[in-house]
Every structure is written in structure tokens, then in C-alpha cells.
Image (spheres, rainbow, N blue to C red):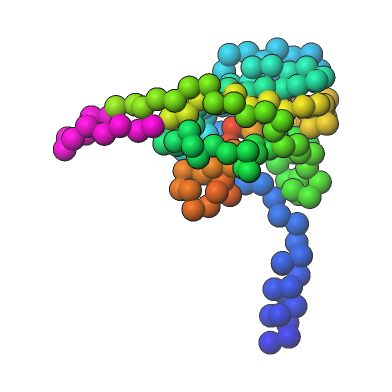
Amino acid sequence: MRTAVFIFMLSACADSQYTFIAQSLPLQNPAAGGALGEGLATAVDGFSKHHWVSFTEQEACFESRLEDLQADMVTPQKPFVLMGFKDKAQPLSTVAQITSSKVEIKSVGQEKVETTERAMAFPHVDVVVCFANPGRVVTNETTYVVLKVPYSSDNESAGASGSRDGIWRLTR
């Protein structure tokens, strides 16, 4: 019994890791002067898409389409997080991360989907998300950048599953 309790306590103290469940989009490292390009990082939900639109010393900005989400659900109390990983095995406690300095709703809309039974409308929200001083996260040594979205596909987990996150694999 003591051994089981000790193992449980030891595992509770173990450092957690981010689960890279979405496919990463290859991109030249902007901290090393790489171009951002036009590619979209598609989240594991298959619908949410992220475009990295700018990177300077002062600010990095992204445009994201978040499917099946209402505009009133996007709140300042749930900031986006930008994380920079040296590799996929890096413990979360050592990952450089910053919270969004600006989240602005760009547009809202609905996609109509025809099913065999009826037509359905799925809402989406287009947002611009910016981060001040991104060089604290994106450096020459950064291999993966994650735009962590605080809203998951099932709103019960509040973004814990990473279902809407965008992931970029930086090349040199």
C-alpha cells in the first residue's frame, strides 16, 4: 500500500508535457529571418485554422478561424498563449510562453452544411491574436511554436485538449 501511495505521489510531481496531437506546419524560423509564408496550421479538430501573419521584435500576430464558436465566448479572461519548444519532449515547466496582448474579433459568420436530414448552420469566429515581445518565446533555438487556443471543441475542457491549437515546426 505504501509503495502504491509513493508511486502516485511521485507521478503527481512529474513534470507534464504538451501533447502534440495536431500536425505541425513547417515554417522557416522568423527569429532567424525566415519568411512566414501563406500556409495555414490546421488544428486537430480539422476545422480551426491559423495563419501566422507577422513577426517583429515588438509583436507577433496570428489570424485564426475558430469553428463552432460564438463571438461572445471569446473573452479577455481566457487569453491565448504562445509557447516555444526546443523539442517535443520538453517539460511544460521549462517551455517559454507568453499570453496574448491583444485579441480582436475580425468577423463572425456561419457555414451552412447540408445533411441528408436537414441543413445546419455552424458558427465561426475570425480573430486576430497578437503577442508583445515574441522574442521571449521564438528564438533561434525554438523548434516548435504552439498557438494555444483557450477554447476546445468541447467547451467542457476549456482548451485543455489542444483541439484548436495551431502548431508550427520551425526550420533553419
Residue furthest to the left in view is 117
Tell me the quarter of the picture where residue 144 sits: top right
Is 119 in the magenta? yes
* Horizontal relation, residue 21 to residue 92: left or right: left
Q: Judge by depth and name the residue closer to the eye, 81 or 96.
A: 81
Is 50 in the magenta? no
Q: Position of residue 73 (x, y in %)?
A: 50, 40
Quadrant where the C terminus is found in the figure: top right
Question: Is residue 100 among the parts visible in the rendering?
Answer: yes
Q: Position of residue 115 (x, y in %)?
A: 21, 34
Q: Is residue 133 above or below residue 56?
A: below
Magenta span: helix, strand or loop, mainly?
strand
Q: Judge by depth and name the residue closer to the eye, 150 or 78.
A: 78
Question: Is residue 161 among the parts visible in the rendering?
Answer: no
Quadrant where the N terminus is found in the figure: bottom right
Residue ID at (57%, 18%): 39
Tell me the quarter of the picture where residue 36 sits: top right
* Horizontal relation, residue 117 to residue 125: left or right: left
Residue ID at (69%, 50%): 17
Task: Specify the segment rendered in magenta.
Answer: 113-123
* Horizontal relation, residue 160 to residue 99: left or right: left
Q: Position of residue 157 (x, y in %)?
A: 53, 52
Q: Position of residue 155 (x, y in %)?
A: 48, 48
Q: Is residue 43 above or below residue 140?
A: below
Residue ID at (34%, 26%): 111
> How many numbered circles does the render carry?
0
Residue ID at (45%, 36%): 69
Q: Judge by depth and name the residue closer to the eye, 49 or 20.
A: 49
Q: Is residue 74 above or below residue 140?
A: below
